Image: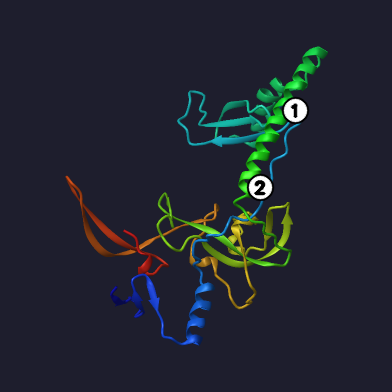
Amino acid sequence: MAIEFGEDDTLWMGQRLCAPDVEDLRREILEEAHLAAYVKVEHQAPVGRLHSLPIPEWKWERITMDFFMGLPRTPKQCDAIWVIVDRLTKSAHFLPVRESNTLDQLAQKYVAEIVRLHGVPISIGPELIQDTVDKVQLIRSRIKAAQDRQKSYVDQHRREMEYAVGDRVFLRVSSWRGVLRFGRKGKLSPRYIGPYEITERIGPLAYRLALPSEMSQLHDVFHVSMLRRYRSDPTHVIPAQEVEIASDLSYVEEPVRIIGLRVKQLRSRVIPLVKVLWKNHSSEEATW
């Protein structure tokens, strides 16, 4: 295997960095790499045991909802769909709304369309009540059995991780190239920023972090799987300003220049390929 010089005058043998046989120098290189802003893909089991959602006691007692926006306008000028789902029976209502609707308008529509249909019945007989109760209990028992199976399977591939208030942790962010997640073929995903101090524990699997003012647009509560323990070094900070982080904790990777060209020959056609160097990454992480 040939030995070559990299762009930064480092010596490489294939994908391996060559260093002098000096113990102190090797230790310094490894410590600097472990504290770098880029962290290699984790091969450990995800953290955080699965905690199942509470099973509702009665139909339409607990709901979930979502909005589908940006749809073509209807004759009544509706351009969105409000989806409301009963968590117990999984029945749903699809309500046409407008993106400009206020909370008061949505509340009035909920009363008119949901409460009107699923209010507390007062004129049904005891036999129908008992039949409904039996069916609800059967549904709840099946949901509980499905949750137990899912939890048993998921927890086999996860590990427990807990932090205390005052601990400092790195926060994981995801990089994107257009619509494709960066790191699908790369070697340095995910990326961590911080460290940030934990100020509060929220339930069994979430923590509130003390984020800097430039990240005030982000919600400050994160799942334990997005955190990575930081071993203390108060002088070491990975600034968030290096990348522009979106509200969903993602950032866009930007191409810098083309550093290579090649042609892929197929049976009936030829495909030209370019090797792209990405911002904040070395030439070893360039992709075709």
How many numbered tags mark residues here? Answer: 2
Colouring? rainbow
Residue 250 rendering spot, x and y as whole percentages: 51, 55
Give the quadrant of residue 143: top right
Q: Residue drawn at (70%, 35%), measured in percent from left and top?
A: 144
Give the quadrant of residue 107: top right
Q: Nearer the viewer, residue 108 or 90?
A: 90
Q: Nearer the viewer, residue 102 or 92?
A: 92
Q: Label 2 is placed on what type of residue?
A: Leu
Give the SS element for disc 1: loop
Residue 6 rendering spot, x and y as whole percentages: 33, 76
Q: Residue drawn at (46%, 87%), measured in percent from left and top?
A: 22
The answer to whether residue 11 is above or below residue 138 is below
Label number found at residue 50? 2
Left or right: where 19 falls relative to 268: right
Residue 36 rendering spot, x and y as whole percentages: 51, 72
Q: Nearer the viewer, residue 209 or 69?
A: 209
Choose the circle earlier in sequence order: 1 or 2. 2
The answer to whether residue 211 is above or below residue 16 is above
Inspect this view and state whether residue 261 appears.
yes
Q: Nearer the viewer, mark 1 or mark 2?
A: 2
Cα separation, mark 1 vs mark 2, equals 24 Å
Left or right: where 101 falls relative to 270: right
Inspect this view and state whether residue 100 appears.
no
Left or right: where 210 falls relative to 1: right
Residue at numbered disc 1: 58
Q: Residue drawn at (72%, 35%), measured in percent from left and top?
A: 55
Q: Which quadrant, please, contains the C terminus?
A: bottom left
Category of crowding for the residue at label 2, using alpha-carbon neighbours closer than 10 angstroms: few (below 14), some (14–19), many (at least 20): some
Q: Label 1 is placed on what type of residue?
A: Trp
